Image (tube, rainbow, N blue to C red):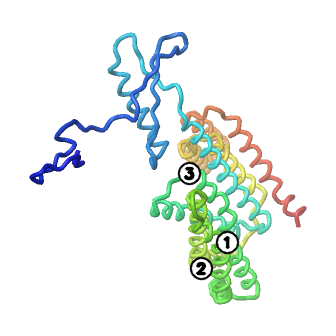
Amino acid sequence: RDLVIKTTKDGGLIRLRDVGQVELGGNSYEISAVNLEGNPAVSMAISQLGGSNALVVSDGVKQVIEEFKEKMPVGMKIEQVFDSTEFITASIEGVVGSLRDAVVLVVLILFLFLQNWKATLVPGIAIPVALVGTFAFVLGFGFSLNQLTLFGLVLATGLVVDDAITVIEDTSSKKETGLTAVEAAKSTMDELFSAVIATSLVKMCVFLPVLFFPGATGTIYKQFAATIIFSIAISTFNALTFSPMLSALLLSSEYKEPNRRTYTIAATVIGFVYGLLFVGDGAAMALIPAGVAGIIGFAISKTSGRPLRLPFAVGGAVVGLVIAGVWNPIPVIFFTGLGCALGYFVPVIFSTFN
């Protein structure tokens, strides 16, 4: 509106708003008549502006369409026939599934090699700590959760446990020499502090040059490299602070090898939760009835002397599946049964592996 298009002899300015009307409009008003499923229709394409978020634009368009549906004349309707963001959504869901599988596999492999649930817990907790902290950095630096950042998290899942594994293993070995858990943790950090920082810096230096790639390549992969660097930095801080404290806390009590029943129950619960995550429905909504039913069954078992905990827990799990609206319970049942079988044979697996 304030664009100067001419200067008069007496120094006056003639702006665009003085001779015309300026308003924000569409890039093109071309529309075309089409035949949609045998009905005459008019098509209109909506494109996003440069720098905008495609998913946000798509949600906004859907909201506008819903508003227009209430105002359409009788005999006319408005609907969306194509959405290019469906591919983006499917791709992100695929990467999220890969992240879920990576976390589960990393924890299982840790448990297979360490063969101690307390020792597995230390690097296992390092994974969500690093991932959640990385989300904060991603938000703080203005990045978005896209395929590249999520893929960076998938790759970082295997990197963030290295330092925590080193800490718990060294603490365990020092405790076996006769030191207390706290003394073993302190001795471990005196010995490994510099080594942990050095290894983390080396891993960061691998991805650091990617941040300075020129042109479109640098723009594309910058978020990927930054995500991995963020996760490594947070896991390093975790290994130097939280992991030694947790190692001392867990190793301070005497370790008693769980029996086969404990392994079976734990693996069954893990399989049930993983099945819920696999089908993409609300895990919390389905777990709450199962937990409540298990507590009720435990209370009744204590008063009546009858083993009612398992039947109540199974009934609560079924009710939870119905409440959560799980449309395909087959994966949930499959992973629950698989967890139950693996938990039962864990002692055999350990002995064979050893």
Q: As displayed, is residue 187 above or below residue 97?
A: below
For image coordinates 59% across by 79% down, the residue present is 240
Amino acid type of the residue tagged 1 in the rendering: Val
Q: Nearer the viewer, residue 267 or 275?
A: 275
Amino acid type shown at disc 3: Asn
x, y percent for residue 166: 71, 77
Residue behind mark 3: 146
Mark closest to the chain's N terminus, 1 or 3: 3
User: Is residue 193 toward the left or the right of residue 267 in the image?
Assistant: left
For the residues bearing labels 3 and 2, Cβ distance under 8 angstroms: no
Q: CA distance from mark 3 to mark 2?
A: 30 Å
Q: Which residue does the numbered mark 2 point to in the structure image? A: 240
Q: Marks 1 and 3, Cα distance to the nearest angstrom? A: 22 Å
Foreground mark, 1 or 2?
1
Disc number for residue 206? 1
Quadrant the N terminus occupies: top left
Residue extending farthest left: 10
Residue placed at 56% from the left, 71% from the top?
A: 234
Q: Is 284 above or below relative to 196?
A: above
Q: Residue 254 at what x, y percent from top left?
A: 70, 75
First-in-chain label (1 vs 2): 1
Q: Position of residue 224 (x, y in %)?
A: 60, 60
Is residue 226 found left or right of 103 in the rendered image? left
Q: Residue at x 58, y 68 (%)?
A: 212
Q: Where in the figure is residue 126, as x and y percent of width and height?
A: 62, 67
For label 1, the SS is: helix
The quarter of the rendered structure image containing the C terminus is: bottom right
The quarter of the picture where residue 76 lies is top left
Where disc 3 sits, the SS reads loop
The reply to whether callout 1 and callout 3 are in contact (CB within 8 Å) is no
Going from N to C along the chain, the mark reached first, 3 or 2, is 3
